[in-house]
Image (spheres, grey):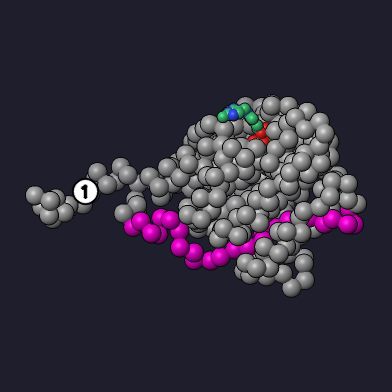
Amino acid sequence: MPEVSEITGTMTPTWCPGCGNYNMQKALAEVLAESGIRFEDYVMVWGIGCHGNGADFYRSQGFHGLHGRALPLATGIALSNPDLKVIVEMGDGDGYGIGGNHFIHSVRRNIDMVAIFHNNQIYGLTTGQASPTSEQFMKTPSTPGGVVEEPVNPVGVAVAQGATFVARGFAGDLEHLKDLYRQALAHEGFALVDVYQPCVTWNKVNTFKWFRDRVYKLEELKGYDPTDRTQAFDVSMSTFHELTCAPDECKIPIGVFYREEDSFTYQDGLPQLDRPMWKHAETPRDISAAVAAYE
Ligand SMILES: Cc1ncc(C[n+]2csc(CCOP(=O)(O)OP(=O)(O)O)c2C)c(N)n1
Ligand code: SF4
Ligand SMILES: [Mg+2]
């Protein structure tokens, strides 16, 4: 079993003191370490943003892609080598904004990978502009009069689009987050873990305390069935609330919203992707009959 320090490497993260990214890294590194996964068996892909700087703070095989393009990169990796566990890390601006199209299509393709979103509801790296998940009416340097439009509801979109594993975590609850990561890593298919990750420097509204006052666990919700897609969608809609609403008026569910066992993955539909590309060269298929048909 690898040590946690073998997963994270020796670089000291440069995130602001108190940033939610620290706990997200701790949770993932500890879960990967306890799983016993070997260095050569997984690959990580990052988008651009504060979260993306994690590319320097893991000692994994990986690819630090363009802003918004982590999912297509991860798709290429997952399809070319089914033996690899693919873990993607994105930001809310990164993956739900500029990369939103890739998000929808990765979900519906059910490509086997884990997609972790650092949802701080702000553009952290570029100094606090509004993101696609910023609360409506929130004032930021790019929206001095307040955000006009409704935020993206990533959990609701994923559930509606046929996702086979949808979870939401909170960076302030390490053990709960670790449990979600364990389940996502064990899932076969596209596993979304949207994580509320307070940005302590630029988002002065959605703070650790703000979330602690509001989050509740779905597993403690009486009668909640995470295999019921309609119920999952219904609960995902309860996340929307007014910027100023009091803790007892708006509660935010975290946990597994939806899961489907034995789902049909994109890889299942393409049996020729049963092994890494390089192994195809080792045991070439006989295509002479196909070639002969065109001669
Ligand atoms: C194509 C492109 N557009 C814009 C940028 C500038 N840019 C870099 S990071 C970023 C926003 C990051 O916000 P988010 O994805 O939420 O990540 P965070 O920093 O909050 O972790 C932007 C707009 C870029 N690098 N590439
Ligand atoms: S700007 Fe925000 S998201 Fe970025 S490192 Fe600092 S606290 Fe974290
Ligand atoms: Mg962000």
* Residue 127 picture location, percent across and down: 73, 27
Identify residue for label 1: 284
Closest to the observer, 93 or 187: 93
Closest to the observer, 148 or 107: 148
Label 1 neighbour load within 10 Å: few <14, some 14-19, many 20+: few
On screen, residue 68 above or below 257: above
* Residue 208 picture location, percent across and down: 82, 43
The answer to whether residue 76 is magenta is no
Task: Provide the residue span drawn in magenta.
Answer: 247-271
Look at 68% across and 51% down and name the residue there. Answer: 153
Q: Is residue 54 shown to the viewer in this render? A: no
The answer to whether residue 251 is magenta is yes
On screen, residue 169 above or below 19: below
* Residue 78 picture location, percent across and down: 44, 46
Q: Is residue 104 shown to the viewer in this render? A: yes
Look at 77% across and 53% down and name the residue there. Answer: 240
The residue tagged with tag 1: helix, strand or loop?
A: loop
Q: Main secondary structure of the magenta part?
A: loop
On screen, residue 55 above or below 32: above
- Say left or right for 272 vs 285: right
